[in-house]
Image (cartoon, rainbow, N blue to C red):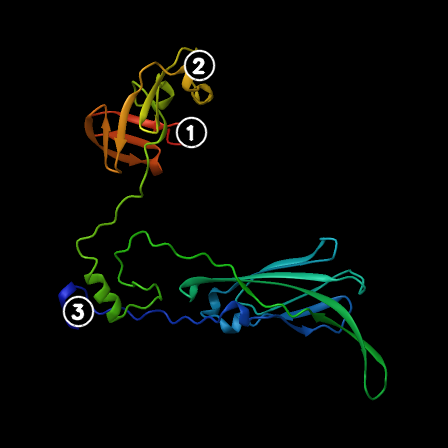
Amino acid sequence: MLMAAIFGFGPLSEAQVTTAVDCDQMGLVVNVGSLPNSINIYHPGGYLTWPSSENVMEWEFTDSQGNVLHEETLVDENFVSFDFDMPVTDTMYVSVLLTNDSALNNGNPVACLIEDYLVWEVDTWPNSGEEYGTWTLGGNVGLDVSEPIEPDCNLQYDGDGDGTVTVVDVLGLLGEFGQSCEDPAYTVEGRWLWSPSDNVEDATTMYEFLEGLIYTYYCDAAACDESYWASLDLSEAIPNPDAYSFDGETLIWDDVPQGVTFECDGGILHLSLGGQFWRLGADCSE
């Protein structure tokens, strides 16, 4: 408990136990396939992924022409069954996406996609020689389609992202002291509108930051909307552009340095000496 005393937090709550195997260890199984117009299929992911109550399976079955024979979303259910009207000479295609946001596999929430096909195979009983048919899978395995979790900040207890806080994670946190969660790096490059009011729709001036130079445009039309500003080119800017440089925090505009802050995912720019600008095309009007 020494670390808990140092950092001022109590005992860590017991982490939820989660289990998930790799997607390529999952394949579908025909549970009942001896009927030409009915089928029952088993997905082992419901047994291999826990907590099973959070397992969601999105099923879709189509024929060779792409016509949907059956589609269904099941929760905490390993089997899917349905009747269909398709000749046994056709091929059935099956797609199932298993997701479980409470279970982790390789540090990411489970998302496994299986795409397979079924054909009607005819064989004979060895004793009687009588023919029988059954729907048979191609045997494809699952594909991991999960998206990595991108942490908002690197200052976190679970440093390796495995869902469990260990002493190694806490020691790693020591090395993060003194750091801060910084805003994303936005650029001033591009076109910005300036308005005499707090409404971007009243904009009368546009500044274009381009390769170290600031070009200025004034509105001389009846309607100074976004399409008007976007239609202007460099030949329509006023002569003698200003010079600028930007290091990510400080903008030097004609030898005058001032701090820069952004809002609306980089769509609004504020200058420390005064001035608000809207990036052309950004949806930051509200």
Q: Nearer the viewer, mark 1 or mark 3?
A: 1
Which type of secondary structure does the marked residue at label 3 adopt?
A: helix
Q: Position of residue 214 (x, y in %)?
A: 32, 23
Within 10 Å of the Cα at label 1, are there few (<14), some (14-19), or many (20+) other Cα atoms? some
Q: Amino acid at mark 3?
A: Met
Q: Depth check: give the residue in front, 282 or 50.
A: 282
Could you say which disc has been placed on residue 281 in the image?
A: 1
Say whether marks 1 and 3 touch (CB < 8 Å).
Answer: no
Q: Amino acid at mark 2?
A: Ala
Left or right: where does residue 126 sit relative to residue 146?
right
Within 10 Å of the Cα at label 2, are there few (<14), some (14-19), or many (20+) other Cα atoms? few
Which type of secondary structure does the marked residue at label 1 adopt?
A: loop
Left or right: where does residue 196 sit relative to residue 26?
left
Q: Which residue is mark 3?
A: 3
Quadrant of the drawing holding the N terminus: bottom left
Q: Position of residue 246 (x, y in %)?
A: 26, 33
Which type of secondary structure does the marked residue at label 2 adopt?
A: loop
Q: Which residue is mark 2?
A: 223
Q: Amino acid at mark 1?
A: Gly
Q: Position of residue 102 (x, y in %)?
A: 42, 64
Q: Earlier in the sequence, mark 1 or mark 2?
A: 2
Q: Earlier in the sequence, mark 1 or mark 3?
A: 3
Left or right: where does residue 107 sit relative to residue 94?
left
Residue at screen point 27% across, 27% down:
244
Measured Cα–Cα span from mark 1 to mark 3: 50 Å
| Residue 211, quarter of the rendered image | top left
